[in-house]
Amino acid sequence: MEILNKLKNLDAYPKVNEDFYNRTLSGGLITIVSSIAILLLFISEIRLYIYSGTETKLIVDTSRGERLRVNFDVTFPSLACSLLSVDAMDISGERHFDIRHDIVKKRLDHLGKVVDSRKGDIGAPQIERPLQKHGGRLDKNEKYCGSCYGAEGSDDHCCNTCEEVREAYRNKGWAITNMDFIDQCKREGIFQKIQEEQGEGCNIHGFLDVKKVAGNIHFAPGKSFHHLSFPFLDLFSFQAEYNISHKINKLSFGKEFPGVINPLDGTGWIQPSSSGIYQYFIKVVPTIYADIRGHKIHSNQFSVTQHFREGNFYPRPLPGIFFIYEFSPIKVIFTEENKSLLHFLTSICAVLGGVFTVAGIIDAFVFHSHRAIKKKMQLGKQG
């Protein structure tokens, strides 16, 4: 019995230091702040675990023979649709002049409101007794064969529209010096259309399908054609100065993908007093975006620099704006990935341990500082 009584009176645990169980106001505040920090960090880790992150990888682009869709939406507030054409050419020799398919033009008034919207260019021919190749007017039951005005490729070659006359001149490498004398162009009302649209603007949007090689896209006032592999313009397009002020609503290469930034979207430029050409030098970077389900989007990103070239010197440059692009040999691959469960649990343990450790250090520092100050104050009173 004596042994049992001694064991009861024996303090099996040493006296705990009062520092570890004293309740203080600072300790309570630190506990509340630590709990809030743990909650916020826990929510953050859950978000990171639920939502996927993106991993970036660079590889050499070995693709060959691919084609690319260039999407554009450009507004010219001071250039009429009847004068605006789109050309494309590349270093492989592929050339497209006065492109009309997959392109829509919208006539704009001086306030920027849409007046008319149409595909293609000026419109259908107005047929009314057109001039025949032999010099007379078209008679009833007579087959129409219009003159090419000296640019015929053969004896039976007919030019029945203004565009066919222009094409015949292109093939010869000639410039049309005066379109007033071309019956087909007068009947189709080209000059009347130009007069009607004087003072208007134009919004042109659509897409072009081009080869994946270096090239350029040209938005030009006037109808361009080529001679000896160099681009020229019909002479009538130089009869006036053209205001090529513009706003690029959209320009992209390929499909859209999450996070893509097209640096020219929403940008614009106002032409100064002198005329000339505005050039955009674009570096296109092939890109693949793979989402969390493994679905891949083949697209492109690009960077751009720009330059205005005045047209008051000889040889006079082509008016309009040029998008001159080339491709990077490096391909970027974005891959969506989720954190693993093990990584998530490790992060949670690190959050809990880190917050508790920091909170303990701060609490100990505050407590001992307060205790030391209190002792000094007591010693001061005693002295």
Image: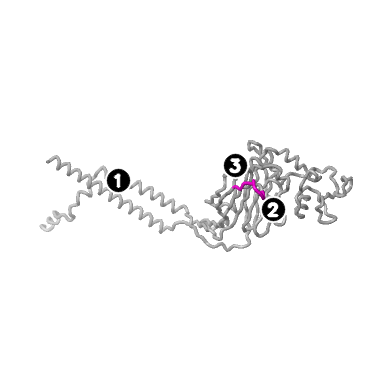
Residue located beneath label 1 in the image: 30
Residue located beneath label 3 in the image: 270
Q: Indicate which label's residue lies in the foreground, 1 or 2.
A: 2
Q: Image check: 353 left or right of 210? A: left
Mark 2–mark 3 distance (CA, rounded to whole Å): 25 Å
Q: Earlier in the sequence, mark 1 or mark 2?
A: 1
Mark 3–mark 1 distance (CA, rounded to whole Å): 59 Å
The amino acid at mark 1 is Ile
- Asked if residue 27 lies in the magenta stretch, the reply is no
Residue at screen point 35% across, 55% down = 350
Q: Residues within 10 Å of mark 3 (few under 14, many from 20)?
A: few
Q: Determine the secondary structure under disc 1.
A: helix
The amino acid at mark 2 is Pro
Residue located beneath label 2 in the image: 231
What span is colored magenta in the figure?
A: 308-316
Q: Image check: 105 left or right of 263? A: right
Quarter of the picture containing the C terminus is top left
Q: Earlier in the sequence, mark 2 or mark 3?
A: 2
Q: Determine the secondary structure under disc 3.
A: loop
Residues under numbered marks 1 and 2 in contact, where contact means CB atoms less than 8 Å apart = no
Q: Indicate which label's residue lies in the foreground, 3 or 1.
A: 3
The rendered magenta stretch, by its main secondary structure, is classed as loop
Q: Image check: 277 left or right of 146? A: left
Residues under numbered marks 3 and 1 in contact, where contact means CB atoms less than 8 Å apart = no
Residue 348 in the image: state x and y as whole percent: 37, 54
Whether residue 295 is visible, yes or no, is: no
Residue at screen point 44% across, 54% down = 49
The amino acid at mark 3 is Ile
